Image (spheres, rainbow, N blue to C red):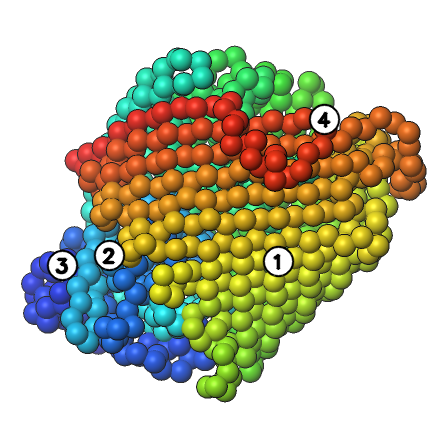
Amino acid sequence: MRAPLLLILAVVSTPVFAVEIDGRIDPAEWQGARHVTDFRKVQPLSLEPGTLPTEGWILATPEGLAIAMRNQQPVDTRTRQRVRRDFEEQVDRVNLMIDYDGDARTGYNFTVSSTDGIADAVITNENQFNDDWDGNWRHAVSEDETSWSVEMLIPWYIAPMREGKDGVRTVKIYLDRVIGSTGERSAWPGASYTRPRFLSDFAPVEMPQYDQSLLAVTPYVSGLYDNISGDSDFDAGADIFWKPNGQFQLSGTINPDFGQVESDDLVINFDATETFISDKRPFFTENQGIFEFTTPSDYSQLLYTRRVGGPADDGNGAGDITAAVKLNGSIGATKYGVFAADEADEVGRTFGAVRVVRDLAKQNLGAMVTYVDRPFLDRTATVMGVDHNWRPTARVSVETRVIGSQIDEHGRTTDDNGATMWVNYEMDHGWRQQWLAMHFGNELEINDFGYLQRNSTNYLNWQVMRRFTDLPKESRYASKDWRARISGTDNDHGDRLQRQLRISREGNLRNGSYEYAQININTSGVDDLLTRGNGVVDKPSNFNAYFEYERPRKGDWAWDTEAEVFSGGLAGNDKIGYNLRVQPTYFISDAFSVYLGGFYERIPSWLVWQEDNLIGEFNERMLQIDAGLDWTITNKQELRVKMQAIGLDAGLEQAYRVQPGGASIASDDVVNDFSVRNLGFQVRYRYEIAPLSYLYVVYGRGGYQQDPFTERPGDLLRDSLELRDDEQLLVKLSYRFEL
C-alpha cells in the first residue's frame, strides 16, 4: 500500500519547474500536476458532461496550492464585463473551493472571472457562503481564439490547517466553471451547493505537506471632516496577523478602524425585532470560520461581531474598542479558537469566546462558550452551545444544536435553553425531504454577543422537494425545482403563532436568467411581539405570493424585478397589499454601468405599536429610489456612487386597544398619522496599492426625519433629497506589510 501512495504523490504533486502565475498554462510548468477533465453539469444538476470542455490542473508547491483551468468557449459568447471584488454578476468565471482539513467544517472559495475580477468567501455549515472575508492570493487570466485560461496560487498561510501525517496532507477540493451567457455550471466532482451536503462531497486529494509562516502588519490612518459640525478627526491603528506554522494563527487589532467605507442599505424598521447587518471589518472577518455557530433560524449565531464596537450601553454613540485578539489552531484532529475584545471607558464592555471542534469519521462535534461583561448595565451574559453534525450515509445528514444562556443582572439570575435539529434526506430522481425542529425558551438570551431574531419559539416543518433537470431542449428552462412545505410555530407559552403551507418553484432559464415564485397560505394566529410584552394580538388568516426575475446582462441591459401580493394585519384577506421593484442596469461599457431602480409598496392594514397595549392600523404607502453607478477603472481602481431615498406615508385607519384575550377593540385614543423621509448618498473611490492595501476617499451624506402628518410619497421622496443630518468626507489609507 505504501508504494502506490508514493507513486501517486510523485505523479500528482511534485513540480518540475516553478509555476509562474501569468494565466498561460505552460505544460512544462504543470508537469506532474493532477489533470482533471471530468467536469459534470451541476447547474442544472443533471451530472451530464459539461456543454463546453473544461480542464483543470492541481499542483502542490512550496509557495502554495497552484490551480490552472482551461475553458473552451467561442470568442463571440464570452462575457467581457469588468467586475469589482466579491462580485455577484453572472459572468464567465471559475471557482476553486478548498476544505483544508477535509472535515466539512470550513471551506474557502476563490473565484476568478474571465476579465480577472476576483471574489473570495468562507463556506460553513456545508453550503453557507460569507463573502465578508478577503484573502491575499495570486491569480491571472489569458485567452486565445478557442479558450480562456486561469492560473491561481493560494499560499499555505491563507488559512489554518491540521498537520498532515508522514509528510502527506489530504485536502478536499472542488473546481467549477460557469458560462455567463447561459448560467450553466460544470464541476469536478459532481457536488452542488444546492444540496444539503456540499463540503462533504468535495474530492480528497493527497499532496506533500508544506508549511508557510507569515507575519503581516496592516497599519491604517484616517481623517474625517464633518461638514455639519465643522469638526475634523484623525485616527490611527493597526491589525496584526501572525502564523508561525499551519497549526496556529494569531490576529490582533489595536484601535481598530471604524471609518465607514461601505454603505449599508437603508432600513426603516418599526418591528420589534432587530435587523441583521453583516460585518466587513478586516479583523473580524479574518479566519472567522472556526467561530461559526449558527442555527436554522434566520441569521442566528452565537458570535455576532457587530456587537463589538456597536451602540454603547449608555446610548451615546458606538463603543470604543481599545484592542481585540483572536487565535485559532489545531492539535491533532481537534481545532480551537479564542476571541477577546475590550472597549474603553466606564460604559465599555468586555467580550470573550472559546470554541473547540473535533472531527470524526462520519460526524463532528463542537462546543462554544461566550461571555460579555456590561458594567454600565450591571449585567453579565454567559452562553454555551454544543453542535453536532452527523452524516450517517451519503444521502442523509443531521445537524443538531443545543444552546443555554445564563444572565446575571442587578443581582438576579435567569437561565434558559434552546435546541434545533435539521434532517435532510436525498432520494432518487430529484426527490428530497427535509425535517426541521426548533425550540427557544422564553428566557433564552444570546444577543449580548450573538444574534437571535426571537426567543420563545417552538417550530416544526416538513418539506418535500423535486428537481427537474431533464427538460426538453425546446423548453426555455434548463431546470426547475418545486418545493412544498408545511410548518407550525408556537411560542413557549403555548400560543399558536402560525400554521403555514408554502409552495415554491425555482427556475433556471437557458438564457441565464433566474426565476423564483412562492405562495404562503397562513392560518389565523397571534402576534406576541407587536405590543412589546403587553399582550398577544389575534390576527386572522392571510396569504402572500411573491415572484422574482433576474436577467443578467444581454447587450447593454440587465434587469432585476420583484413583485409581491399579500394580505395581513387585522384585516386579514379583506384588504390586499402589494409591492413592486424594478431595477434596470445600463452598461455604457464593459467597465461602466449605471442603474436606476424604483420600489413602491402599499400595506392597507399596517400595524404599528404606540405604547402599552395601544396599536395603530395605518394605510402605508412607500416609494423608494435606488440609483448609482459602478466604474471599474482598472482592476486596482473603482468608483462607486450610490443613492437611496425613501418616502413613507402612513395614514391612520383606526386606533385599537389590545384586550387580555388578544382581541383588538377600536379606541378613541389619539394616534397621529406620520410620514418618514430617509436619505443615504455615498461617493466612494478605492485604489488598491498592493494586496489588501487600499486608499479610500469617501463622501457621504444622509438624513432621517419623521413627521406627525401625511404627505404623498412622491413629495416625501423629493423632499428627502434635501436631508442633511450627516455630511462627511473620509480619507483612509491602509497598507499591509508582510514580514
Q: Which three-letter amino acid code belongs to the residue tagged 1?
A: Ala
As helix, strand or loop, the secondary structure at mark 1 comes to: strand
Q: Which three-letter amino acid code belongs to the residue tagged 4?
A: Pro
Q: Please tell me which residue lies in front, 429 or 702.
A: 702
For the C terminus, which image quadrant? top left
* C-alpha separation, residue under disc 2 versus residue under disc 3: 11 Å
Please tell me which residue is depicted at 45% across the width and 44% down the height of the picture: 627
Q: Which three-letter amino acid code belongs to the residue tagged 3?
A: Asp
* C-alpha separation, residue under disc 3 versus residue under disc 1: 45 Å
Residue 437 percent location from the top left of the image: 68, 57
Disc nearer the start of the sequence (4/3): 3
Say if mark 4 contacts mark 1, CB within 8 Å.
no
Left or right: where 379 falls relative to 508: right
Please tell me which residue is depicted at 50% across the width and 24% down the height of the picture: 724
Q: Residues within 10 Å of mark 4 (few under 14, many from 20)?
A: few
Q: Please tell me which residue lies in front, 135 or 5.
A: 135
Q: Is residue 25 visible?
A: yes
As helix, strand or loop, the secondary structure at mark 4 comes to: loop
Q: Residues within 10 Å of mark 2 (few under 14, many from 20)?
A: some
Say if mark 4 contacts mark 2, CB within 8 Å.
no
Disc nearer the start of the sequence (2/3): 3
- Which circle marks residue 708 in the picture? 4
Residue 688 percent location from the top left of the image: 23, 40
Q: Please tell me which residue lies in front, 12 or 466.
A: 466
Disc 1 marks which residue? 563
Please tell me which residue is depicted at 65% across the width and 52% down the height of the picture: 579
